[in-house]
Image (tube, helix red, strand yellow):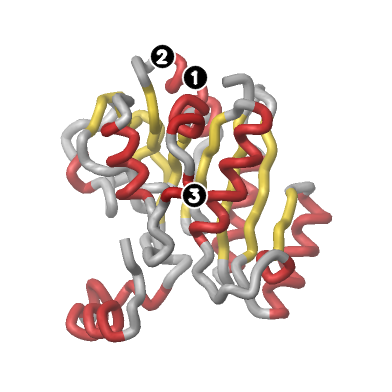
């Protein structure tokens, strides 16, 4: 792996996304990389803000409305497009969600980490809150701060690097199109294919859970309404 294809999918959470973008582009990263933001049918106003930011900061913006008529979420399409781009160069694919703020050394650290970890399929940065406490979705890692260790639990795609070895072996066209999110599936496929997934608790990233999908806050504030929406409207299929 001689470089990384960094991506951020987004819909309408523009203020937090701009923080994500600025953190990525100000990272201490010395390896070749590309950075693409996939705009998944944000409003006209927010699309305009992203287009202005793209010109100002120099990242690539893909408006999915130019590519598909399929309604949001289009995470499957984003993964498939990004996998093809990464494989063209035999690079890794690094996903950073729009409610995540990476540290100065996060991206470079994950890149080097995959080279040091045996049979690495996925290298994931642990998520923390504003106070530095490990939070959702990695609460199970509390007590194992400042470590790198293999995990059997799934790696969230809050901030995860998928290695070229995994990308070559698992074609994302095989993913179940009836689902919305794929971190669980891809994590399990990585293990099934003989790779190991590693959690880097020494590379924490700030995560504001569900900042990109505010309705999911109902899971904690009003779980009955959350699960009613989830099952009656077919939302959030994992």
Residue 222 lies, in percent from the top left, at: 22, 82
Q: Is residue 101 above or below residue 64?
A: above
Numbered disc in front, either 1 or 3: 3
Q: Check disc 1 and report its element: helix, strand or loop.
A: helix
Quote the CA–CA distance across marks 1 and 3: 28 Å
Front residue of this view, candidates 186 and 53: 186
Numbered disc in front, either 3 or 2: 3
Discs 1, 3 touching: Cβ within 8 Å:
no
User: Badge 3: how crowded within 10 Å, few (<14), some, or many (20+)?
Assistant: few
Q: Check disc 2 and report its element: helix, strand or loop.
A: helix
Q: Which mark is residue 116?
A: 2
In what quadrant of the picture does the N terminus appear? top right
The quarter of the picture where residue 180 lies is bottom left
User: Badge 2: how crowded within 10 Å, few (<14), some, or many (20+)?
Assistant: few
Residue under the image location 55 percent in, 76 percent down: 71
Q: How many marks?
A: 3
Residue under the image location 62 percent in, 20 percent down: 2
Front residue of this view, candidates 65 and 99: 65
Q: Which residue is mark 3?
A: 173
Residue 195 lies, in percent from the top left, at: 33, 25
Q: Check disc 3 and report its element: helix, strand or loop.
A: helix
The mark that comes first in sequence, 3 or 2, is 2
Front residue of this view, candidates 175 and 51: 175
Front residue of this view, candidates 224 and 163: 163
Residue under the image location 50 percent in, 69 percent down: 73
In what quadrant of the picture does the C terminus appear? bottom left
Is residue 110 at all visible to an observer of this figure? yes
Q: Which residue is mark 1?
A: 112
Quote the CA–CA distance across marks 1 and 2: 7 Å
């Amino acid at each position: 792996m001689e470089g990384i294809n960094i991506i951020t999918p987004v819909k309408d959470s523009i203020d937090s996304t701009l923080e994500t973008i600025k953190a990525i582009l100000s990272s201490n990263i010395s390896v070749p990389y590309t950075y693409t933001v996939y705009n998944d049918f944000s409003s006209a106003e927010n699309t305009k803000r992203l287009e202005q930011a793209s010109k100002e900061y120099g990242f690539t913006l893909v408006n999915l409305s130019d590519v598909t008529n399929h309604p949001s979420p289009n995470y499957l399409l984003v993964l498939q497009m990004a996998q093809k781009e990464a494989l063209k160069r035999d690079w890794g694919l690094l996903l950073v969600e729009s409610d995540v703020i990476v540290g100065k050394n996060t991206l470079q650290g994950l890149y080097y980490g995959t080279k040091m970890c045996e049979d690495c399929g996925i290298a994931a940065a642990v998520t923390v809150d504003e106070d530095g406490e490990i939070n959702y979705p990695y609460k199970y890692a509390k007590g194992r701060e400042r470590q790198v260790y293999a995990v059997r639990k799934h790696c969230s795609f809050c901030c995860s690097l998928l290695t070229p070895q995994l990308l070559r072996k698992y074609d994302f066209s095989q993913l179940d199109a009836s689902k919305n999110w794929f971190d669980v599936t891809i994590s399990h496929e990585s293990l099934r294919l003989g790779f190991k997934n590693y959690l880097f608790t020494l590379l924490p990233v700030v995560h504001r859970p569900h900042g990109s999908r505010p309705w999911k806050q109902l899971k904690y504030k009003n779980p009955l309404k959350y699960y009613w929406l989830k099952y009656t409207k077919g939302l959030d299929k994992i």
